[in-house]
Amino acid sequence: MSNRSKNNVLVFNIDDLSTWQKYRRGLCDTCYATCCTLPVEVTVSDLVRMALVDEFEAEGDLKAIAKRLQKARIIDNFNHKTAIFTLARMANDDCLYLDNKTRRCTIYLQRPETCRNHPQIGPKANYCPYRPRG
Ligand code: SF4
């Protein structure tokens, strides 16, 4: 499947998986970091690495952590059955940790596992919602 229209124009629609581009080395260098506008699911271990939760708190009530982080607008929601938190995003869908000028992650070394595993794991394995920087 190609992400080019009949007129050979690149089509970018993050919600349409048929427009996603097969990942290849170097693709990120020219990308707008569109993957960092997708909802990011994280575990409490990610939150510890991101220094949002300490080891002691992580062993306690996850719902209490969710409540605190929701109030701080760091997470959008928490699924208590799966123990998965979803990071909040900015009004334009950017991740809170994305620098909107450089389009680089500001917590790269501490980033969640979901981000480390993209695009091997994600809505379409090994494909990216690639969009070139304008
Ligand atoms: S934590 Fe970093 S890598 Fe992950 S979505 Fe946010 S900006 Fe992107």
Image: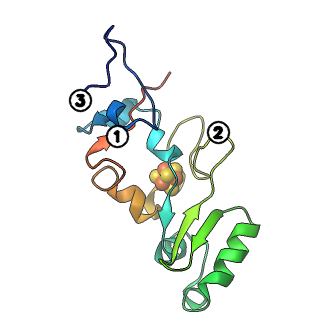
Q: Residue at x 36, y 34 (%)?
A: 29
Q: Are marks 2 and 3 in contact (CB under 8 Å)?
A: no
Q: Are marks 2 and 1 in contact (CB under 8 Å)?
A: no
Disc 3 residue type (three-letter): Met
Q: Earlier in the sequence, mark 2 or mark 1?
A: 2
Residue 18 point in image, percent of width and height = 33, 33
Q: The N terminus lies in which quarter of the figure?
A: top left
**Residue beneath label 3, please?**
1
Q: Mark 3 packing: few (<14 Cα in 10 Å), some, or many (20+)? A: few
Cα gap from disc 2 to disc 3, whole angstroms:
28 Å
Residue 127 point in image, percent of width and height = 29, 41
Give above or below for 105 relative to 7.
below
Q: Mark 1 packing: few (<14 Cα in 10 Å), some, or many (20+)? A: many
Disc 1 residue type (three-letter): Cys
**Residue beneath label 2, please?**
92
**Residue beneath label 1, please?**
128
Disc 3, SS: loop
In-image side of 112 versus 72 (left or right): left
Disc 1, SS: strand
Q: Earlier in the sequence, mark 2 or mark 3?
A: 3
Disc 2 residue type (three-letter): Asn
Cα gap from disc 3 to disc 1, whole angstroms:
13 Å
Q: Mark 2 packing: few (<14 Cα in 10 Å), some, or many (20+)? A: few
Cα gap from disc 2 to disc 1, whole angstroms:
19 Å
